[in-house]
Every structure is written in C-alpha cells, then in structure tokens.
Image (cartoon, grey):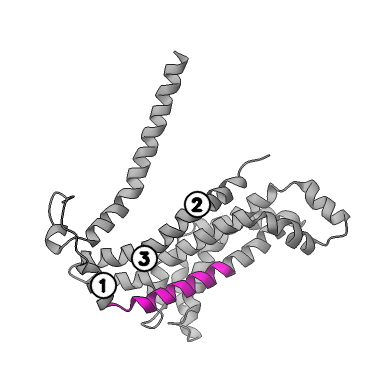
Amino acid sequence: MKRLHSGFWTSIKYVILLAFLVWTAAPVALVIMTSFKTPFDIFQAPVKWIFEPTLANYEKAFAAGDFTLYARNSLAIALVSSIISIFFSAFAAYGLTQFNLRRAGAVSNLFLLGKLAPAITILLPLFIIMSKVRLLGAYVGPVLAHTAINLPFIVWLLMSFINDIPADLISSAIIDGCSKMQVFWKIVFPLLRPALASAVILAMQLSWNELLFSLQLTDVNTYTLPVGIAKFVGSISVDWGKSSAAATVIMAPMIIIGFFLQKYLVQGMTMGSVKG
C-alpha cells in the first residue's frame, strides 16, 4: 500500500513537470515552426503541424533589417550592463553580509523592493535624464536601465550564497592577518564563481531580450535585436513570418549558452539556498 501511495505521488510529480515543460516549450516551438512556414500555412486554422518548410522568412528578415548592427549593439549593451551589475552586486552583497553596517537589513530589503517595482516606473525619469544630458540614442541609456533591473536580484542571489560560506573560514583568514578586502578576493570571490556564473547568464539573458528601454532610449544606430523584431509589427498587421524568423535567430544564442552552462546556472541558484 505504501509503495502504491508513493508511486501515485511520483506520477503526479511527473505530470506536473510535463505540464510545465509543455507550458514553457510550446510557445518557443510555435515561434520556430512559424518561422519556417509560408504566409498561407501560418494562418491555417487549426494549426498546421505538417508543412513544407521554407527559408523565405529568414531571407526577408535579414534583408529588411541590419541584424549585424543590431546583434553588435545587443552584445555590447548586454556585456557592459552585466559586468557592471556583477561588479557592484558582489561588493554590495559582501558589504551587507560581512560588515557590521547599521540598517543593513533595511538596505537589503530596499533592494528587494527595487526588484518588485515595475521596470516601467524608471523609464520616464531615465528618459528625462538622458534627454537633459543629450545621451538619448547612446548605449549608456539601456546599459543603466538594464543594470538597475539586474542589480536587486543579483545582490540577493550573492547575499544568500555568501551567508552560506562558513564563518570559521572567514574568521581564520582575518586571524591570519587578512583585511576585509583580502578576505573578499582570496576567500569569498573564488567561492562565488558558481553564483557569479549563474548571475552572468541571467543578466545577459534579461539584457539580450529586453525591449521597452531599448526601444525608447536608442536610435537607428543603437537599436538592439528586440527592437529589430518590433519593426515588423505594423499599425494594422504583423508580419508573423519575418518576426518569427528574427525571434528564432535572437533566441538561439541564449538557448545554446543556457544549455551548455546549465550546470553552473543550477549550481549557483541552489547552493546559496541550502544550509550545510
């Protein structure tokens, strides 16, 4: 009876996981399928699962937009914002957990509030600031916006990880004559590598896929890949073929990177949540 009960709950778990997999993967699969369909096949109802694939949408998408420029812009913005986010988040998390700072808990809670606040709330003030200093259309706008969005989550991720580092290890380094910063570079930073790897992946993913700030704070010379897709959305209709082809091209790098680095992503996300 006990074995039957255990098997029942195991089956329920697999059903839930399968439902979540379908919920997550189905939209991606539909976009990829649509990118290989003709306009006639795209608008078939119900969805046409068997069709003759075509590369015409990819040819039209690359002919309609400068995707080499968009990809270069996206890569530059994602890299710079991720590096800045990781750099400041690592020091902030270390300071909030290892220094005897007054109201450190309140400050860390403010970081959480920054993550909970809708991203659009910072768009208008950031747009005004960039306009006043004449930096609209420059890389600095989306870089600052993406950094502001990434910082709260990364700080909390690294704080939980640093809190799991044995206190005796840090105390021993201080007794041996290490300063707080030497402890950070020699002890804490090497142990943070799994968490930093997952933080880099998540920060890059958000910046690579972000549209709102990239659309409002850039111009034709600094458009990113999501903005390039938005060009296929007209006021009356949407070119589903070209937009799906462009979306597939944009998704591919992050999917490939996530696939090869998933070990570090899972390790960094879970090690800071398990007490030894």
Q: Between marks 3 and 2, how big is the CA–CA gap? A: 19 Å
Residue at 47%, 15% in the rendered image: 2
Which residue in the protein does label 2 denote? 262
Q: Are marks 2 and 1 in contact (CB under 8 Å)?
A: no
The type of residue carrying mark 3 is Ile
- Quadrant, the N terminus: top left
Which residue in the protein does label 1 denote? 61
Residue at 36%, 33% in the rendered image: 15
The type of residue carrying mark 1 is Ala
Q: Residues within 10 Å of mark 2 (few under 14, many from 20)?
A: some
76 in the magenta segment:
yes
Q: Position of residue 72 (x, y in %)?
A: 43, 76
Q: Is residue 47 above or below residue 149?
A: above
Circle 3 SS class:
helix
Relative to the observer, which residue lies in front, 221 or 246? 246
Which of the two labelled residues, at mark 3 and mark 2, occupies the earlier sequence position? Answer: 3
Magenta stretch, residue numbers: 65-83
Relative to the observer, which residue lies in front, 206 or 236? 206
62 in the magenta segment:
no
- Quadrant, the C terminus: top right
Q: Which mark is residue 156?
A: none
Magenta highlight: main SS: helix
Relative to the observer, which residue lies in front, 245 or 230? 245
Q: Position of residue 193 (x, y in %)?
A: 63, 57
The extreme bottom residue here reads: 134
Relative to the observer, which residue lies in front, 153 or 67? 67
The mark tally for this picture is 3
The type of residue carrying mark 2 is Gln
Circle 2 SS class:
helix
- Asked if residue 64 lies left or right of residue 163, the reply is left
Q: Is residue 134 visible?
A: yes
Which residue in the protein does label 3 denote? 250
